[in-house]
């Protein structure tokens, strides 16, 4: 089969290769990949800026259909349309695995960086990590279930946004656009911000998705808008998805006293300068959000099925595996939100 492989350590070193079709262990299923999304972490691996274990097939956001079942698999049949959680190699013994937080297991090695991923014709996954794709949800839409589950954990699980809350989402990337939609579905009044670079694509899509207030920070000061909308109090919830010092500090400025900051974005550097004392004096609640759990996936798929979350406007292109470099370039340029590889057209 064909697979997109990070062949060694260093910048670049990504090749489309003929690789062996994976074999099945007793509890695993073989999935024919129908769509796989390019994530920021895939771009970071390309640039040698994210942990990985080469040689490894990239890609972890995917949807497909079951092509074969291992000997001990129950409850699934060939042809089932599925997505899968990423907690492969979780030990099952540590406190995190035993309390439903397999995503924090120190032994976890997820597809796309720790084990072979989904930028290939087939991928093998443990059957216990599968979820059924609801009727009416296409493979390209279902391929975004993984980033949607991350946004669900943040806004619903950690944020518990309530009707009437003023919610600010900093960063209009895929996670930011998903968080904004989820907050709006909870009855929140939602503001999303971006820069001039985001104006023609990401901010334009935010407007199409019906987000209440879309702010280009090169044209307007979002702090003034938040003060106006809140009567001077500040935002109830600020979702930081960009992971840069400017927006992290902006979140501290925007949040109201005893408000909530959801930290979703991952900074590239090890250390950043943060105005921590201002957050302390506000008595702000800061919650760090990472990965997702079983309930997050179930809620994500339900929200995709009911239309509470729309991902079609976020998809800028479908590419064959052979055109992977073009797809990577689209996302790297900032002119696209989400590009998908289609290994089995």
Image: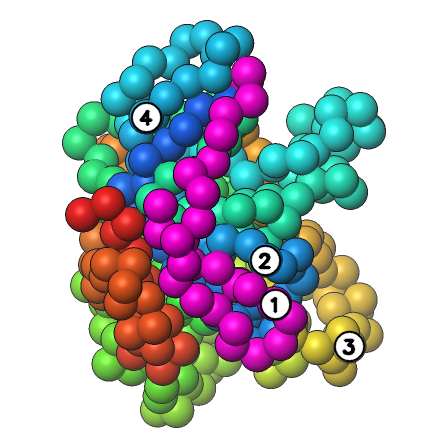
Specify few, some or many for label 1: CA neighbours under 10 Å numbering under 14, 14-19, or 20 or more.
Answer: some
Cα separation between marks 3 and 1: 27 Å
Q: 155 or 244: nearer the eye?
A: 244
Specify few, some or many for label 2: CA neighbours under 10 Å numbering under 14, 14-19, or 20 or more.
Answer: some
| Mark identifier at residue 339 | none
Cα separation between marks 1 and 4: 30 Å
- Where residue 269 sits, quadrant-wise, is bottom right
| Mark identifier at residue 67 | 4
Specify few, some or many for label 4: CA neighbours under 10 Å numbering under 14, 14-19, or 20 or more.
Answer: some
Cα separation between marks 3 and 2: 29 Å
Q: 328 or 322: nearer the eye?
A: 322
Let me know if residue 210 appears in the view: no
| Mark identifier at residue 271 | 3
- Magenta range is 1-27
Q: Residue at x 76, y 60 (%)?
A: 283
Cα separation between marks 2 and 1: 6 Å
Cα separation between marks 4 and 3: 45 Å
Q: Residue at x 80, y 24 (%)?
A: 93
Q: Position of residue 78 (x, y in %)?
A: 30, 18
Mark 3 or 2 closer to N-term? 2
Q: Are the residues at dot 4 and dot 2 in contact (C-beta closer than 8 Å)?
A: no
Position of 278 with respect to 88 (left or right) is: right
Q: Which residue is mark 2?
A: 55
Relative vertical location of residue 156 with respect to residue 151 in this rendering, above or below: above
Let me know if residue 117 appears in the view: yes
Mark 1 or 4 closer to N-term? 1
Q: Are the residues at dot 1 and dot 4 in contact (C-beta closer than 8 Å)?
A: no
Q: Position of residue 322 (x, y in %)?
A: 27, 63
Is residue 23 shown in magenta?
yes
Disc 4 or disc 2, which is closer to the eye? 2
């Amino acid at each position: 089969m064909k697979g997109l492989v990070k062949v060694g350590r260093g910048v670049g070193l990504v090749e489309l290769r003929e690789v062996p079709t994976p074999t099945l262990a007793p509890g695993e299923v073989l999935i024919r990949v129908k769509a796989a999304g390019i994530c920021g972490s895939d771009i970071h691996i390309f640039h040698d800026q994210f942990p990985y274990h080469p040689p490894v097939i990239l890609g972890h956001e995917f949807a497909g259909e079951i092509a074969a079942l291992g000997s001990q698999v129950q409850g699934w049949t060939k042809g089932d349309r599925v997505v899968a959680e990423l907690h492969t190699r979780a030990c099952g013994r540590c406190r995190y695995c035993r309390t439903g937080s397999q995503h924090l297991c120190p032994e976890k090695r997820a597809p796309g960086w720790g084990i072979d991923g989904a930028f290939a014709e087939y991928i093998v996954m443990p059957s216990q990590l599968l979820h059924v794709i609801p009727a009416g949800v296409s493979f390209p839409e279902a391929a975004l279930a993984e980033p949607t589950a991350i946004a669900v954990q943040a806004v619903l699980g950690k944020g518990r946004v309530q009707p009437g809350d003023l919610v600010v989402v900093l960063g209009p990337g895929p996670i930011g656009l998903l968080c904004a939609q989820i907050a709006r579905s909870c009855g929140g009044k939602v503001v999303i911000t971006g820069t001039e670079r985001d104006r023609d694509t990401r901010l334009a899509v935010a407007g199409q998705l019906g987000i209440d207030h879309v702010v280009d920070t090169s044209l307007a000061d979002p702090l003034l808008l938040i003060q106006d909308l809140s009567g001077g109090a500040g935002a109830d919830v600020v979702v930081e998805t960009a992971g840069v010092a400017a927006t992290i500090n902006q979140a501290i400025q925007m949040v109201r006293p005893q408000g909530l900051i959801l930290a979703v974005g991952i900074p590239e550097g090890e250390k950043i300068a943060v105005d921590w004392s201002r957050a302390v004096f506000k008595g702000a609640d800061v919650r760090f959000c990472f990965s997702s759990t079983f309930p997050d996936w179930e809620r994500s798929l339900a929200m995709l099925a009911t239309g509470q979350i729309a991902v079609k406007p976020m998809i800028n292109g479908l590419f064959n595996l052979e055109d992977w470099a073009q797809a990577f370039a689209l996302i790297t340029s900032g002119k696209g939100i989400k590009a998908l590889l289609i290994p089995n057209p």
